[in-house]
Image: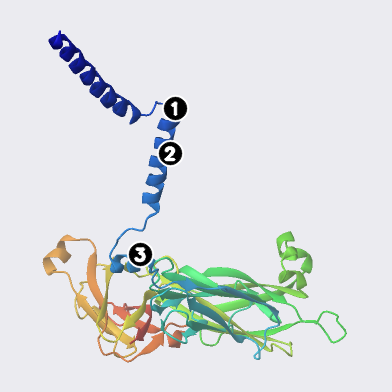
Amino acid sequence: MRAIVATVLCGLLLGAVVGVGTGKIQSSRRAWTPSMEINTTVKAAKQAVANADAPKNEPAETAASKAKIGPRVEVLETSFDFGILEKSVANEKGEHPFKIKNVGDETLTLANGGKGCFCTDFEISRKSLRPGETATVLFKWDAARSGGVFNQGVRVLTNDPKAPEVDFAVRGLYTAPIVCEPNEISFPNASATSESTRTFRLFGFEHNDDGTPFPLEILGVDADEDALLEFQIEKADLAELTDKERAHNLFANTTNLFKGVATLKPGKPQGAFQEIVRVRTNSPKTPVLEIVVGGRVAGSTVRLSGRRYDDKGTGYLTLDAVSTRETTEEQLRLTILDKIPANAETVRVKSVRPDWLQVEFVYPSEELQKAAPVRVVGTTVRIPAGSPQGAFMGPNKEQLGEIVFAVGETPETTQEIVLPVRFAVGP
């Protein structure tokens, strides 16, 4: 009986212990609800956003390099219109300042990138700009030989990778008392053995003090420098103006109109030429009108060719800007269609301008000359290092470089070939 009671008591004690432990385990758990999973997701999302917004521990040099933008160009004005001006000695020259500012955080450098015409020039006040600094590009022009529309530009080079070139332009309209159209009379491919003609017109714009049209007259043409040039000019009716010209802000103001014909007679030396013809008038403002006449006379037995030789138009060899610190060379070919031998006696240089301009020939071998129907003489034009600085860009003939070749066996059969050379020697 005692054993039974002991067993029962042990069972009761064991059940109590188990019940207490189970209750503690159950009390530590919470019943699952949908809000539990949502709360967990929201917390994870918030943590992800916080992690993304947290600053990265990058090296100080990397962060600084990302902030730099380098040199940066700021230009508020790239073109200037001076409007309509009556051309005179007082206002045919002008200038206008353009500004370049460095809005970057590194030094901005500026350099001369060239100009579009000999009638323009420019100066850069400062070639190196620290952040925030400004330079002035002073654009200058001289329209002494221009009439009508003026539109020219210059270029500045920079180290801004987003703006390596900055172009500035000046435009306007010169209402000269008398204008020749075209501005230059050109014979681009004249014959050495036959006449060539070109037509042109003269427009007068003058008025008397009472506002009536000035009665313009042509008194004569002086082309004494070249007896092979002839001019005929006659009065024309204003009714001959086209509708397009009547709508033009220059030609619409025409008070006098003349038609002209320029004739180039045979006998001019082969090569490029340029002359100034003077038209005498009764105008008190323009008693003499200068007209540029130029072109190229093509030869039948001798031809020039080369990469920078304009054999279709001006007949110029254009080398542009060269440096006095180094030698500049350009290769040409002088092709002889005649059957004369090509050697130092028959192909030579008669004269050069300036006198330090160098020319060197490479004559074909005698065997090649016997086998080939034409003779090709290699020609090197050289501007040696150390040449004096200066411009040989025109517009007048005397302001250009020039090479005169002589090709022929006897004085009676020798041809002269004139080659203008356009270049400027800088530092």
Q: Residue furthest front?
A: 1
Q: Looking at the picture, how far across and down is residue 376, in whole percent? A: 23, 67
Disc 2: which residue: 42
Are the two marked residues, 2 and 1, in contact with CB atoms closer than 8 angstroms?
no
The residue tagged with tag 3: helix, strand or loop?
helix
Cα gap from disc 2 to disc 1, whole angstroms: 13 Å
111 displayed left or right of 178: left
Depth check: give the residue in front, 402 or 395.
395
Q: Residue at x 74, y 90 (%)?
A: 284
Camera-near label (2 vs 1) is 1
The residue tagged with tag 2: helix, strand or loop?
helix
Disc 1: which residue: 34
Q: Residue furthest top?
A: 1
Q: Looking at the picture, which amino acid does disc 3 mark? A: Lys
Q: Residue at x 56, y 73 (%)?
A: 76
Q: Looking at the picture, which amino acid does disc 2 mark? A: Val
Marks 2 and 3, the one that precedes in the sequence: 2
Camera-near label (3 vs 1) is 1
Q: Is residue 67 above or below residue 99?
A: above
Camera-near label (2 vs 3) is 2
Indicate the quadrant containing the N terminus: top left, top right, bottom left or bottom right.
top left
Marks 3 and 1, the one that precedes in the sequence: 1
Indicate the quadrant containing the C terminus: top left, top right, bottom left or bottom right.
bottom left
Q: Looking at the picture, how far across and down is residue 52, in whole percent? A: 38, 50
Depth check: give the residue in front, 17 or 318.
17
Q: Looking at the picture, how far across and down is residue 267, in whole percent? A: 44, 76
Disc 3: which residue: 66
Q: Is residue 241 visible?
A: no
163 displayed left or right of 370: right
